[in-house]
Amino acid sequence: MHSRRLACLFLGIWLGASLLMAWVATENFRNVDRLLAKPSPAAILSIKPLGPAAARLLLRYQVSEQNRRLFQAWGTIQLIAGAGFFLFLLFGTREGKYPLMLVVLMLCVVILQLFALVPSMVAVGRLIDFAPPDQLTGERSRFWVLHTMYVITEVFKWGLGLFLGLRLARRRGRSGNTGQNLDPIDKANHRHVNR
């Protein structure tokens, strides 16, 4: 019973951290516009020689690089932690093959993201970072296709994780009859119990 609770806790942390990463990446870009809308007096002195458009471009580049590094690191962390979670379910619980298959599918999504989607998004993103909006339209389209594929695979992974979490939380035991595992205290050899 405790191993299932630990599995649910770990899964919740994994899914929660995935949501946190999506929020952080989005907020990083929003913070550029917030900063430029109300810059501090010291920031105004640095922004003025560049001009608002060039400053925005430079700050968005910095945020893009930061997000790229975060997603590469997060993919590696997910791969290691997900493999550990699989091993925990395999050797530390009595879960059957279906929860294990769900974790393997989640790991396949992480592998696809880490080794195919993220490197491609990083490469194409670096090509278009400083390009004017009317140039490199093919690369921009390719970037958004890759980004959409990443979001779709992330939602699929979250769906698998939620299904796994529900399965772990609702499942009682392998036999389905956990009441038989309890030792009654009414047996004849337990007469020392006060009645």
Image: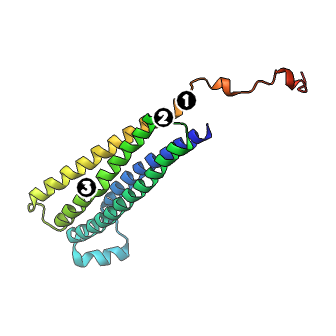
Kindly indicate the quadrant of the structure image that contains residue 179: top right
* Mark with earlier residue (2, 1): 2
Q: Nearer the viewer, residue 105 or 63?
A: 105
Q: Which residue is mark 3?
A: 116
Q: Which residue is mark 1?
A: 174
Kindly indicate the quadrant of the structure image that contains residue 47: bottom left
- Residue 79 higher or lower than 188, as above or below: below
Dots 1 and 3: beta carbons under 8 Å?
Answer: no
* Mark with earlier residue (2, 3): 2
Q: Residue at x 17, y 64 (%)?
A: 128
Q: Amino acid at mark 1?
A: Arg
Give the image location of residue 19, x and y in percent: 40, 48
Disc 1 is placed on an element classified as loop
Q: Residue at x 44, y 35 (%)?
A: 97
85 relative to 136 in the view: left or right:
right
Q: Residue at x 89, y 23 (%)?
A: 191
- Viewport quadrant of the C terminus: top right
Q: Which residue is mark 2?
A: 96
138 relative to 25 in the view: left or right:
left
Give the image location of residue 137, x and y in percent: 10, 57
Q: Amino acid at mark 2?
A: Gly
* Mark with earlier residue (1, 3): 3
Q: Nearer the viewer, residue 48 or 71?
A: 71
Q: Residue at x 21, y 66 (%)?
A: 126
Give the image location of residue 81, x and y in percent: 46, 54
- Residue 6 higher or lower than 166, as above or below: below
Crowding around mark 1 (Cα neighbors within 10 Å: few <14, some 14 to 19, many 20+) is few
